[in-house]
Image: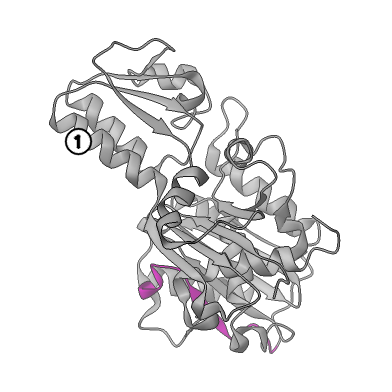
Amino acid sequence: MLNRPLLAIDIGGGTQDILLYRPDQPLENCVQLILPSPTVICGRQVEAATAARQDVFLRGHLMGGGALVGALRRHLAAGCRVYATPEAARTVYDDLERVRQLGIVITDQPPEDAVTIKTGDVDLATLAGSLAPYGVKLPAEVAIAVLDHGEAPQGMSDRVFRFQHWQRFVAGGGRLEDLLYREPPSYLTRMKAVREQAPGAWLMDTGAAALWGALEDARVAARSEEGLVIINCGNQHTIGVLLKGQRVLGLFEHHTSCLSGHKLAAFIEKLRAGKLTNEEIFNDGGHGCYIDPSYQPGDGFRFVAVTGPQRRLTIHQDYYWAAPYGDMMLSGCFGLIAAVAGVKINP
């Protein structure tokens, strides 16, 4: 593990999982928090405004949409108004014209009676203030995982655009170390917004963090050289990978809400056999699938490890539920720590 303190934050669609890692004490004694995700918090604030028949004004940073965008749509459908700064509005769509078409007014000067909701995925000051009464200080070094669809070119599906990012990764060698960023690609606008809120933070996709984290489970790590399948069943997205050693040879990503246990098991078997296609996943409402042409299932890749808060989808399968250090909900945090520990340069 890492030889210095690290604040690891894994921000999902339902929860934000937080670990204040210290190398001088057992992981079990490190401060750990499972809190509602920022999009859930903001979504609840919108819902309260809807119930009170009050207009809302979004200001702050681009953040994850999810529950917030759903609440905004219901707020508008109820006949209430939504105002937003350009940056906050990009939480809904990167294309501001599409935001306006929903009925959201883009402005820096909202009506005085509108309820202001601060947007953003990270608020280190609030976290530090919440822990201060317990005598706990935040580590100076920070690593954060978020799911970033990226800013798609006009007219392109964000599902297609996000999966192009994954396909380039696998086709480019699928090296695990390439999943951790100091400087994310320019099109990953959510990660860029996180960097503004937490300057100098390490950044990673939530799917990548879960992958790294699952490998911190000793039984999973023991199968990596023979090849295995790792599945992360997140609250909003499910990702499955073919992994051998430190290389990802294949990958699919779907929306968890579209999956049943039977359907997921069928996708996993096709992935292992090298027969799952991009069209099959995309036409089912997911992002896509890509398997490197060099992939050969052979006798390996029969071991399937599952992590993520929706892992119960696999309850009827003979899969291994990975729980690194005995705590599945912190898989992403453990993955962030392991990834930073593997960096061969000083931060």
Quadrant assignment for the N terminus: bottom right
Residue found at the far right of this picture: 345
Residue pictured at 61% horizontal, 49% vertical:
163
Residue pictured at 24% horizontal, 20% vertical:
55
The residue labelled by disc 1 is 48
Q: Residues within 10 Å of mark 1 (few under 14, many from 20)?
A: some
Q: Position of residue 296 (x, y in %)?
A: 74, 77
Residue 69 is at least partly visible in this image: yes
Quadrant assignment for the C terminus: bottom right
User: What's drawn in magenta, residue-wise?
Assistant: 299-313
Question: Does 76 sit left or right of 110 as displayed?
Answer: left
Amino acid, disc 1: Ala
Q: Let me know if residue 178 is in the magenta part.
A: no
Closest to the observer, 255 or 324: 324
Question: Does 248 sit left or right of 220 as displayed?
Answer: right
Residue pictured at 60% horizontal, 89% vertical:
219
Compared with 6, 160 (above or below) is above
Residue 241 is at least partly visible in this image: no
Closest to the observer, 173 or 286: 173
Occupied quadrant, residue 197: top right
Residue pictured at 39% horizontal, 10% vertical:
109
Occupied quadrant, residue 276: bottom right
